[in-house]
Image: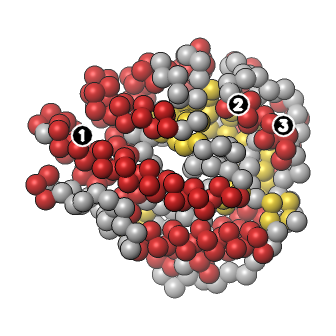
């Protein structure tokens, strides 16, 4: 058995406490950094083009597993491999027929396909479609690599995104804003179809990932029972009243159907929707993402205190030099800080020691 993390069981115990918004022996910290000595690698070949770079299993899967083997997973960071990378943003759009557009080797996007509601596509999961087949193939092959090499790691789900966010991508966010005024029933009808397709996609992809020990979305939070992120970045464009009428019913339904959920609160324009989310007893946690140009995590301590006082666990990205300040200023109960690009394994270990515990 090849292990990527020696203190895995301790991390699981702390993460279970976090999900329940209970206090652990220290604030939780996910910190990933370059490992001093890789513990696993496999041969890879160069991509012939950008499509192969993202999707061909002989190109993309070795790259993902080699990154896994070269990464130090400190604290509550979990060794996860995503056979369908999270950078393939809102892949559900593609499952529903939207053409893919490659931006570069870091980002992909989807084309709009709802140009008018009278000619709306069926908005059902296309299991004969290219991207669904890529997903099934790569998840199955990744499972074979894990088993054959006896890797002690987990498999993450594709970035399915939130159903109403998916719909805005299929339609066009600006046009959907107008639709909420001019043709609200069309939006609600389409959102219902997308939500149903989303559930189907989640169930089928989770059936492939969960045998490896977790239901992990793009956030990388381990959970042994069904869990999902809740998203609707489109909501940053609309009022709190419109959110409550058109978006929140679908968020609430998702939260009711999953034992564990985290709402992705992305940017200052989403804060207007926070109160209704804090009132939802089925939402376990809030991920606060302050976004580019909005300062650093330590600039948002008052907002994060508000989230904690609202009874929710908190998940926040930060930098190494902010960890101890956040741990001091915020309630340690239900606090998970995340450093995705630590400077070194040595620095990560030292930071965990100062925080109050090890982690390897």
Camera-side mark, 2 or 3: 2
Camera-side mark, 3 or 1: 1
| Residue 57 picture location, percent across and down | 59, 77
- Which residue is rendered at x = 32% and y = 29% of the image? 243
Camera-side mark, 1 or 2: 1
The mark that comes first in sequence, 2 or 3, is: 2
Query: Which image quarter: residue 124?
Result: bottom left
Whole-Å distance between the Cαs marked 1 and 2? Answer: 34 Å
- Pointer 3 residue: 352
Q: Is residue 84 left or right of residue 234?
A: right
106 is higher (above) or lower (below) than 21: below
Residue 188's label in the rendered image is: 1
Visible in this render: residue 134?
Answer: yes
| Residue 188 picture location, percent across and down | 24, 40
- Pointer 2 residue: 18
- Could you say which is closer to the camera, residue 338 or residue 61? 61
- Which residue is rendered at x = 15% and y = 33% of the image? 181
- Residues at discs 2 and 3 in contact (Cβ within 8 Å): no
Q: Is residue 149 left or right of residue 211?
A: right
Q: Is residue 273 left or right of residue 309?
A: left
- Which residue is rendered at x = 54% and y = 59% of the image? 205
Whole-Å distance between the Cαs marked 3 and 1? Answer: 47 Å
């Amino acid at each position: 058995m090849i292990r990527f993390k020696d203190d895995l069981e301790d991390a699981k115990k702390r993460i279970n406490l976090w999900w329940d918004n209970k206090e652990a022996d220290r604030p939780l910290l996910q910190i990933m950094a370059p490992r001093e000595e890789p513990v696993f690698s496999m041969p890879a070949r160069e991509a012939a083009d950008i499509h192969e770079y993202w999707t061909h299993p002989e190109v993309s899967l070795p790259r993902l597993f080699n990154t896994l083997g070269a990464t130090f997973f400190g604290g509550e960071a979990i060794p996860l491999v995503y056979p369908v990378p999270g950078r393939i943003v809102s892949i559900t759009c593609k499952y529903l027929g939207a053409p893919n557009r490659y931006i570069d080797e870091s980002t992909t996007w989807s084309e709009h396909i709802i140009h008018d509601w009278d000619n709306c596509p069926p908005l059902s999961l296309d299991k004969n479609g290219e991207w669904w087949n890529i997903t099934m193939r790569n998840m199955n092959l990744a499972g074979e690599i894990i088993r054959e090499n006896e890797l002690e790691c987990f498999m993450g789900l594709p970035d399915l995104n939130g159903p109403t966010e998916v719909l805005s991508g299929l339609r066009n966010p600006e046009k959907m804003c107008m639709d909420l005024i001019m043709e609200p029933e069309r939006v609600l009808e389409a959102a219902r179809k997308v939500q149903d397709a989303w559930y189907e996609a989640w169930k089928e992809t989770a059936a492939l990932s969960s045998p490896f020990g977790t239901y992990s979305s793009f956030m990388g939070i381990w959970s042994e029972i069904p869990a999902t992120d809740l998203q609707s970045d489109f909501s940053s464009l609309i009022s709190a009243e419109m959110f409550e009428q058109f978006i929140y019913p679908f968020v609430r339904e998702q939260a009711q159907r999953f034992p564990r959920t985290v709402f992705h609160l992305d940017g200052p324009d989403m804060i207007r929707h926070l109160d209704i989310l804090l009132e939802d007893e089925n939402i376990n946690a809030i991920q606060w993402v302050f976004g580019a140009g909005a300062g650093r995590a330590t600039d948002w301590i008052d907002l994060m205190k508000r989230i904690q006082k609202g009874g929710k666990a908190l998940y926040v990205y930060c930098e190494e030099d902010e960890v101890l300040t956040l741990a001091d200023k915020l309630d340690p109960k239900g606090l998970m800080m995340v450093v995705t690009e630590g400077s070194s394994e040595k620095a990560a270990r030292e930071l965990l020691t100062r925080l109050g515990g090890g982690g390897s």
